[in-house]
Amino acid sequence: MTTGYDDTNVFAKILRGEIPCHKVYEDDHTLAFMDIMPAVDGHTLIIPKVKARNILDCPPEALKAVIATTQKIAIAAKQAFLADGVTVQQFSEAAGGQEVFHLHFHVLPRQMGEHVKPLPRPFADHGILAAHAEKIRAAL
């Protein structure tokens, strides 16, 4: 069952500046930042700045902006991490695997044969996350 948008979700708090993040990219419509429990090095999250629970309720213009930013980050992350490819993931609703109920896309730069770290994953070192964010920003 779909419910409404919850302003107390962690990504809403990041957008309001209540919780810090390792910012990779920001424009008027989107924000990209490092996942604090990365599946691979360079794991980045891209969110719209509008209140959207997931892809099922996101206004089309906001979805267009978040997809454009996802592509930009995927290209930069692939370059920054000398990756062979990129995995892009999006989960909608609990049954679809969504855990944070603000629309977000995952960008994972991947090496051939590399496996993602299974859940639950530990929190990453903030120094490493900051360095990874800088690598991607440099590739933008």
Image (cartoon, rainbow, N blue to C red):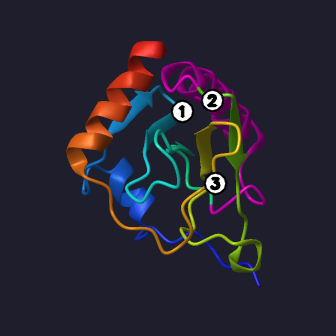
The magenta-colored residue range is 53-82
**Quick one: SS at disc 3?**
loop
Residue 93: % across, % down: 71, 73
Q: Nearer the viewer, residue 18 or 51?
A: 18
**Who comes first in sequence, dot 2 or dot 3?**
2
Q: Label 2 is placed on what type of residue? A: Ala
**Quick one: SS at disc 2?**
helix
Q: Main secondary structure of the magenta part?
A: helix
Residue labelled with disc 1: 29
**Who comes first in sequence, dot 3 or dot 1?**
1
- Residue drawn at (63%, 63%), measured in percent from left and top? 53
**Quick one: SS at disc 1?**
loop
**Who comes first in sequence, dot 1 or dot 2?**
1
Spatial CA distance of label 3 from label 1 is 32 Å
Q: Quadrant of residue 3?
A: bottom right
Left or right relative to 108: residue 88:
right
Q: Nearer the viewer, residue 21 or 85?
A: 85
Q: Is residue 82 above or below residue 95?
A: above
Q: Between tags 3 and 1, which lies in front?
A: 3
Residue 20: % across, % down: 25, 50
Q: Is residue 70 magenta?
A: yes
Residue neighbourhood size for the residue with mark 3, other residues' Cα within 10 Å, grouped as few (<14), some (14–19), many (≥20): few
Residue labelled with disc 2: 74
Left or right relative to 33: residue 64:
right
Residue labelled with disc 3: 115
